[in-house]
Amino acid sequence: MTTMASFAPEHFNWRMDGTVAIVTLDRPDRKNPLTFDSYAELRDCFRALVYADDVDAVVFGSNGGNFCSGGDVHDIIGPLISMSMKELLAFTRMTGDLVKAMIGCGKPVIAAVDGVCVGAGAIIAMSSDMRLASPAAKTAFLFTRVGLAGCDMGACAILPRIIGQGRASELLYTGRSMSAEEGERWGFFNRVVEAGELEAEAVTLAQKLAAGPTFGHMMTKTMLKQEWSMSIDEAIEAEAQAQAICMQTADFKRAYDAFVAREKPVFEGD
């Protein structure tokens, strides 16, 4: 296992609040666009989280009133025009690897979305386990607006599972903006929180998860991912095996002992 308390990324902000990691993009003057470097460093960060025993939950927050404006027009979109097919495929695979890393990191990820959340920014929010929004949040999967397909970074697979096929189809075909109220009503956002309270609310939620049975949370996240491609029978069997593993943890015994003693369990993640 590794520790990430001293992790110092070059292309985004990182800080720890106990065992909660807080990530924000660091270009607020341009509404926090992604670059080739920030894509790659974020991917590597979430891959490393699998082995980080000092991080139990992650908040992906906003900065300067915005979440993320997608790929930087000058640093990414411009150079893509002159790339070969081989180079383009390497880029699109890298961006997809960020989604895979977020889904596979073994930690609950909470997006705290304020202001602009479009393109790859909308994908990052989509790839999180839970999403909180400020009333000003504007989310758009605007790939068709730049002449591309809506099927970017897993959007056609993941978004319909969150908000339904018809609603996802509308957003992915039109590229239009989804308001915070609409996103909450459709189930994309878990709830809407005033902007001044957004990050604190997300961190509080993350801390509650971090204080829970973190091995159990890892298993929950693992099964949420794996069961996408399983039949019902396969999923029930897989969950039987996963739950039997969790029943061997010390946290399971701690919960029982606390119940008998009429106390609140204190979980330690083992």
Image: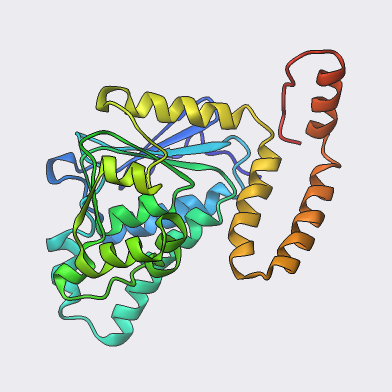
Check the image and report above or below for 18 versus 155.
above
Q: Position of residue 44 (x, y in %)?
A: 46, 56
Residue at 82% in and 20% down: 259
Q: Nearer the viewer, residue 92 or 125?
A: 125
Query: Quadrant of residue 201 in the image?
Result: top left
Q: Is residue 50 left or right of residue 13?
A: right
Q: Position of residue 35 (x, y in %)?
A: 25, 58
Task: Count all numbered tags in the image, as a single digit.
Answer: 0
Q: Nearer the viewer, residue 182 or 218?
A: 182
Q: Is residue 17 left or right of residue 51?
A: left
Check the image and report above or below for 62 versus 103.
above
Residue at 68% in and 70% down: 231
How does the figure colour the protein chain or chains? rainbow
Q: Position of residue 61 (x, y in %)?
A: 34, 37
Query: Quadrant of residue 78 in the image?
Result: bottom left
Quadrant for the N terminus, please. top right
Q: Is residue 144 left or right of residue 189?
A: left
Q: Position of residue 163 (x, y in %)?
A: 40, 55
Q: Nearer the viewer, residue 188 or 24?
A: 188
Residue at 70% in and 66% down: 232
Quadrant for the C terminus, please. top right
Q: Most extreme residue toward the bottom, as rendered? A: 85
Residue at 74% in and 21% down: 265
